[in-house]
Image (spheres, grey):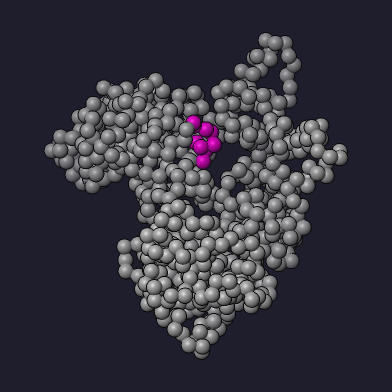
Amino acid sequence: MKISVITVVYNDLEGLKKTTASVAAQTDRHFEYVVIDGGSTDGAAAFLAEGGVADKWISERDRGIYHAMNKGVDLATGEFCIFMNAGDKFHDAEVISKANAALGEADLYVGSTVEVGSGGAQCFAAPSCMTLEHLLKTSIYHQSTFIRRSLLKEHPYEEGLHIVADWAFFFERWLRGAEYRPLDFFVSFYYLGGYSGQHVDEIERERRMVIDRLLPLRLREALRAQRGQRTQRGENESRIERKVRESMEREPVARDLSLIRYGGKFLVKDLLSLQETQSTRRRQRTQRRGEDIRVLYDSQAFDMQTHGGVSRCFAELAAHLPQDVKGRIGVVETDNTYLNNMGFPAVGKTYEDFKMWGPNGVKRFFYKLKYNLGYGQWGQWDRSPKLNLHEGIRVLQRGECDVLHPTFFSPYFLPYLQGIPFVLTVHDMITELYPQYYPADEPQLNNKRVLIPRADHIVAVSENTKRDIMRLFDVPERKITVVYHGADSTPYKPNLGSNRYGEYILYVGERHWYKNFRLLLRELVPVLKRHGELRVVCTGKPFSPEEQVLLDFLGLTDRFVQIYVKTDQELLDLYHHAVCFVYPSEYEGFGIPILEAYKADCPVMLNHASCFPEIAGDAAVYFRMKEGEKSDFEEQFETLYHLDGAEREALLLRQRERLTRYTWEESARKLAEVYRKVVER
């Protein structure tokens, strides 16, 4: 028998029925099914006695879930065990069949998981190779893991841990060299809402206890092994930093690039001086109270975008902070338009200005050597230096800021905080609400799961986004502050001779997924037939082959124009001359194009969804558009189209008044209050 399926249950009869049904549905019957009931009083024992699904089962009191799981291992006889606890279920009826064909000599076989919560489902693929970074950030789903039973017998789950014993088992076994293999199929549905989801603080405490116990131990073993080899070669002992660095280059620790890059420094600080450093940082912050607050914005958004909403938001906020808050952007050089306008040099300027004249091999060598070694990146000495990334790290290491505000979701900075609080801005929850449109290993999905629970405070760009964060991540309301985006205050003067398209509807931005562009196309068919001279102008990328086929099918090809906008003036002129701007999205975090249309005196039509009513209030014409439901877009467009002069001016007046609510000065003032709050803690 190759596989034993083990279910642990206590007073969850409905969950047990769901799990046993998925087990019974397996087409390949070459497995045994073991159920451990903790003495339930809801009829579980009677169900097991009557159902006949379980090959082995017991119903008796136990000392907790991990004691029950260990009892299941003792009863099992299969070569591999998989824990499908009450409420969880196999992904499909072929899982056991596929697993029997795939399991071999490795110790841990991990498949993909569908995680189901109140906000929807998310897919998580098993990583192609297991890394320390993955285990420290998240874990392995035991519902999707086939574990060699001999490993569980030799190293049973630690019953002294209440929540993370399964994670601790995977963590320690991987550190000790257990062989990992990913499976290329989905194994399970995992349903959120259990005990662990309600005790985040206890999870963090137990995980930290395990990490503190295991990583220094593994480090000492690596150091002893390295020291023994040195002695055999008759070499002298070197500084501990060198020992650690060289030990990191050896198997098995060297297999993990994240450990090579980040782990060495982190562990040395943890072993030698982390506590002292944190105390020093606290003393420094106490001494600085009453002085200006120093905020570091890292380079993530500015490295990703030459222009665009996220990077513009942070550039504007940094430029409008009150006098007692000093914003520092951790960028050495950049191609971001907004920072270039603020005086930051372009990418390549640092190399251009470096010592010797003209590009040549010698200059490149010493340039790389100087900056990589200066940033402590010994292993990267021959590569192009990541100037912006390591500039931010250096500011953190030197304690030259009081608050960090990362501009996107990479958690690279966590090992370097040393007690410095960080504030995280969440612009939307699109990846969480629409996981079907993203790969299972989408970095933003996983990185948000790491950073949101750890952030000292979270900034949401709308009340709607705030509610989504609270619902999807169980974050308390007191930890989230809403800071709206501001409107560009640069005066706009229309170019009256710039309209090349006659009478047109304007669509701005991306057109995929939740944007409802395809639904809009269908709703526009009768509108465009009725108004023979009306066109639709779309900014952004060229139409995709699929969009072009749909336009041809609907007979709209000659009524649609796609253009690439190069300047703000050109975009605002498009708004100004349009009959209206249409925003049919099912979900947005804020909706900056609304403010752009307001500024250009363009009537706005919005889908009555997500944050739009919150942002626009009564300063828009609303329609309803949702897949599978009847839309009133045509009716609402005709209402707007036939507004007389006074009615149209009344709408534009409401839009102008609404626009005055959104200023970068007010946004920066509210953000400064958040910084003061986290520093005072």
- Verify whether residue 30 appears in magenta: no
Horizontal and vertical percent position of residue 11 = 25, 45
Q: Quadrant of the N terminus?
A: top left
Q: Is residue 621 above or below residue 70?
A: below
- Res 523 visible: yes
Q: Nearer the viewer, residue 183 or 228?
A: 183
Quarter of the image for residue 314 reads: bottom right
Q: Is residue 75 left or right of residue 340?
A: left
Q: Is residue 10 above or below residue 433?
A: above
Q: Quadrant of the C terminus?
A: bottom right
Residue occupying the point 54% across, 36% down = 133
Residue occupying the point 42% across, 76% down = 531
Quarter of the image for residue 39 reads: top left
- Verify whether residue 132 appears in magenta: yes
Horizontal and vertical percent position of residue 417 = 64, 46
- Res 153 visible: no
Residue occupying the point 74% across, 51% down = 346
Q: Is residue 67 left or right of residue 164?
A: left
| Bounds of the magenta segment | 129-137
Instruction: Report how many numbered discs are placed on residues in the image.
Output: 0
Residue occupying the point 43% across, 75% down = 532
Horizontal and vertical percent position of residue 631 = 35, 70
Considering the whole magenta stretch, tell me its main secondary structure. Answer: helix
Horizontal and vertical percent position of residue 234 = 72, 11
Q: Nearer the viewer, residue 638 or 458?
A: 638
Quarter of the image for residue 62 reads: top left
